């Protein structure tokens, strides 16, 4: 995933999602393109059509911060998507750092064992590097060594567990795209994207949408042992770790879901094996 290709692909994907009326332009006649034309976006960003074409085609690899911010505004990007665009325009050189991953992951895994709610330690590729007993009891996806994006997309049990499977998959694919920006030439990331693109139509659809970033909210899980759970999900980044982060799942205090988590905690203490 070369920088120029990633930047151009992202600009194109976001441009094609904007309708003329969204930015105050008259549709005007028959349109042969989805979303905005290149020249329309260039006009909104205050740059020449030729320069914008060079960006989409990867012939210009170094847009200035002013141009990047103008494009973000023209594309109506939110904070996460704007940060992603900036990282694509100025990626970290070389391969992603790995020397600090193992010790930091071990420390984070020891920390989440003390959490009173389900929590996992994840790599930039959405591999589970550590999971506390409650997380392992919550979902088979949270078994250490498992890639929980692959599991959620491809394992039939995921559709049973996640009441809104489409939203649950969209959140993870957008999270993967956000984590991909700093090292666009990462061969392991490219291999994961290629694998999932070939095996999952849902992944191809979501990757083409180019949404960016984990979004907070409430997920509905239908757990085979404790019933319905409505859980907030949170992401905590671990600084200077090459993309390690902690995902936490919490219920509203006093809610039915909180009582179900208490029951799940008791089950996990009695039997810390993942559910089948």
Image: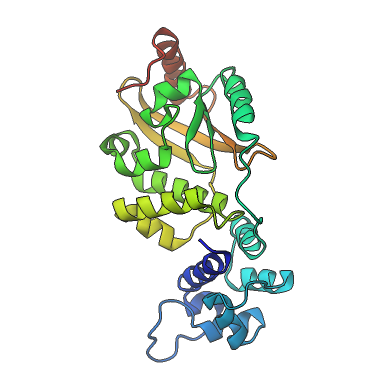
Residue 202 is situated, as x and y percent measured from the top left of the image, at 33, 53
Location of residue 229 with respect to 15 vertically, above or below: above
Res 226 → quadrant:
top left
Res 181 → quadrant:
bottom right
The answer to whether residue 3 shows anywhere in this view is yes
Residue name at image x 51 percent, y 42 percent: 217
In screen coordinates, is 87 left or right of 194? right
Residue 158 is situated, as x and y percent measured from the top left of the image, at 32, 37
Q: How is the image coloured?
A: rainbow
In screen coordinates, is 218 left or right of 60? left
In the image, farthest residue toward the left: 156
Location of residue 70 with respect to 145 vertically, above or below: below
Res 144 → quadrant:
top left
Most foreground residue, 27 or 120: 120
Tally the marks.
Answer: 0
The answer to whether residue 164 shows anywhere in this view is no
Residue name at image x 56 percent, y 67 percent: 7
Most foreground residue, 153 or 217: 153
In the image, farthest residue toward the top: 270
Which quarter of the figure is the C terminus placed in? top left
Residue name at image x 44 percent, y 90 percent: 28
In the image, farthest residue toward the bottom: 29
In screen coordinates, is 266 left or right of 181? left
Residue name at image x 49 percent, y 72 percent: 12
């Amino acid at each position: 995933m070369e920088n120029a290709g990633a930047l151009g692909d992202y600009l194109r994907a976001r441009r094609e999602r904007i309708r003329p009326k969204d930015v105050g332009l008259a549709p005007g006649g028959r349109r042969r393109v989805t979303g905005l034309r290149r020249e329309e976006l260039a006009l909104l960003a205050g740059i020449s059509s030729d320069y914008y074409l060079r960006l989409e085609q990867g012939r210009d690899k170094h847009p200035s911060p002013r141009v990047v911010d103008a494009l973000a505004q023209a594309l109506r990007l939110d904070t996460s998507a704007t940060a992603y665009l900036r990282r694509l325009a100025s990626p970290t050189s070389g391969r992603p750092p790995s020397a600090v991953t193992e010790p930091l992951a071990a420390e984070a895994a020891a920390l989440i064992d003390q959490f009173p709610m389900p929590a996992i330690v994840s790599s930039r590729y959405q591999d589970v590097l550590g999971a506390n007993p409650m997380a392992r009891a919550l979902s088979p996806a949270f078994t250490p060594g498992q890639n929980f994006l692959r599991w959620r997309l491809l394992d039939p049990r995921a559709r049973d567990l996640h009441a809104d499977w489409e939203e649950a998959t969209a959140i993870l694919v957008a999270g993967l795209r956000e984590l991909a920006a700093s090292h666009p030439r990462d061969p392991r990331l490219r291999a994961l994207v290629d694998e999932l693109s070939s095996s999952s139509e849902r992944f191809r659809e979501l990757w083409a949408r180019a949404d960016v970033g984990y979004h907070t909210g409430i997920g509905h899980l239908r757990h085979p042992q404790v019933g319905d759970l409505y859980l907030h999900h949170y992401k905590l980044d671990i600084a200077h770790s090459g993309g390690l982060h902690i995902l936490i799942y919490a219920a509203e205090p006093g809610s039915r879901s909180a009582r179900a988590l208490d029951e799940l905690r008791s089950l996990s203490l009695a039997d810390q094996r993942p559910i089948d």
